Image (cartoon, rainbow, N blue to C red):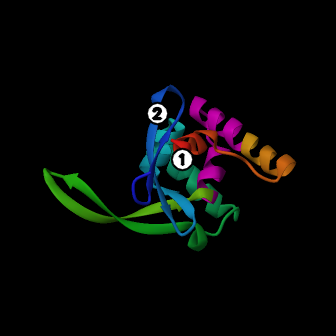
Amino acid sequence: MVGNVEIYQGPEGLQVEVKFEKETVWLNRQQLALLFGRDIKTIGKHINNVFKEGELDKDATVAKFATVQIEGGREVTREIEHYNLDVIISVGYRVKSKQGTQFRIWATQRLKDYLVQGYAINEKRLAQKEM
């Protein structure tokens, strides 16, 4: 982890930068599309439905972060909407893709660990801290 950003390494080498802020993780639409193997438009549709159906409160789960990006060969800072873990999980359970399935398996296992054991262990992170 570098500062408040961690690289998520998924199956088959998928890498997504995950932002940690306000005791949760945040991803933008582009990162969600990469994570779930779907296009940005599809991710946007799922996000809009999460809010439209009243599953989550937009004000409590969306934040804008200044992001530097290259546009036309120059650096530009833009306020980009990011979505917290609640939205990530909700979208993950709606997306139909191989990565979406892998995410659901992972999330369900974490939930089972918490319910059965009262905690879940991130073995990879634990091993890194022991080094």
Q: Where 101 falls versus 1 (above or below)?
A: above
Residue 84, image x, y percentages: 56, 60
Magenta segment main secondary structure: helix
Mark in front: 1 vs 2: 1
> Which badge, 1 or 2, is on the more N-terminal residue?
2
Q: Where 93 falls versus 60 (above or below)?
A: above
**Magenta stretch bounds:** 86-107
Residue 24's label in the rendered image is none
Q: Residues within 10 Å of mark 1 (few under 14, many from 20)?
A: few
Q: Where 46 falls versus 77 (above or below)?
A: above
Secondary structure at badge 2 equals loop
Q: What is the C-alpha distance between the residues marked 1 and 2?
A: 22 Å
Q: Is residue 2 left or right of residue 100?
A: left
Which of these two is toward me, 65 or 3? 3
Which of these two is toward me, 12 or 94? 12
Residue 129's label in the rendered image is 1
Res. 126 image quadrant: top right
Residue 105, image x, y percentages: 70, 36
Q: Residues within 10 Å of mark 2 (few under 14, many from 20)?
A: few
Q: Please state the total of marks drawn on the protein image.
A: 2
Who's the residue at 79% across and 45% down the image?
A: 113
Q: Where 50 falls versus 120 (above or below)?
A: below
Q: Mark 1: which amino acid? A: Lys
Who's the residue at 19% across and 53% down the image?
A: 71
Q: Is residue 20 left or right of residue 79?
A: right
Residue 58, image x, y percentages: 58, 69
In the rendered image, the residue lying farthest to the bottom is 59
Magenta run includes residue 93:
yes
Q: Mark 2: which amino acid? A: Leu
Secondary structure at badge 1 equals helix
Who's the residue at 43% across and 68% down the image?
A: 64
Residue 14's label in the rendered image is 2
